[in-house]
Amino acid sequence: MPVVWHNIWIDPQHAAFVRSAADNNETVPTVVLDGTTYVNPTPRKLLTMINESHPALRRLPSSLAAWRAFRRNRAS
């Protein structure tokens, strides 16, 4: 699943978006999934939301495996 990262400490436009979603706080992560914004979801909640929104995605055997794959993909 494609992921787009924004650094709110160097990008004022995205910082303003995060503040608008998080009661004027710069709370991260702020995640937008299928047009809905979530402020600081737990990894388990985020995986559940992704699984519900995109049931055809390939599943990894555990949350830890998903986290490792995420970190590996982010580094490349």
Image (cartoon, rainbow, N blue to C red):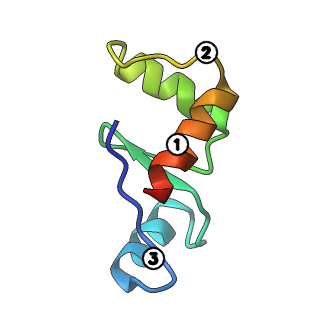
Residue at the (31%, 36%) spot, across then down: 34
Q: CA distance from mark 2 to mark 1?
A: 14 Å
Q: Nearer the viewer, residue 56 or 29?
A: 56
Q: Nearer the viewer, residue 66 or 25?
A: 66
Residue at the (57%, 65%) spot, across then down: 23
Residue type (three-letter) at the residue carrying disc 1:
Phe
Residue type (three-letter) at the residue carrying disc 2:
Pro
The spot of residue 14 in percent (x, y) is 38, 73
Judge the density around disc 3: few (<14), some (14-19), many (≥20) Cα neighbours within 10 Å: some
Mark linked to residue 61: 2
Judge the density around disc 1: few (<14), some (14-19), many (≥20) Cα neighbours within 10 Å: few
Q: CA distance from mark 1 to mark 3?
A: 23 Å
Looking at the rendered structure, the secondary structure element under dot 3 is: helix
Badges 2 and 1: C-beta atoms under 8 Å apart? no
- Indicate left or right for 28 with 57 as reference: right
Q: In the image, is residue 14 above or below residue 60?
A: below
Badges 1 and 3: C-beta atoms under 8 Å apart? no
Q: In the image, is residue 1 above or below residue 11?
A: above
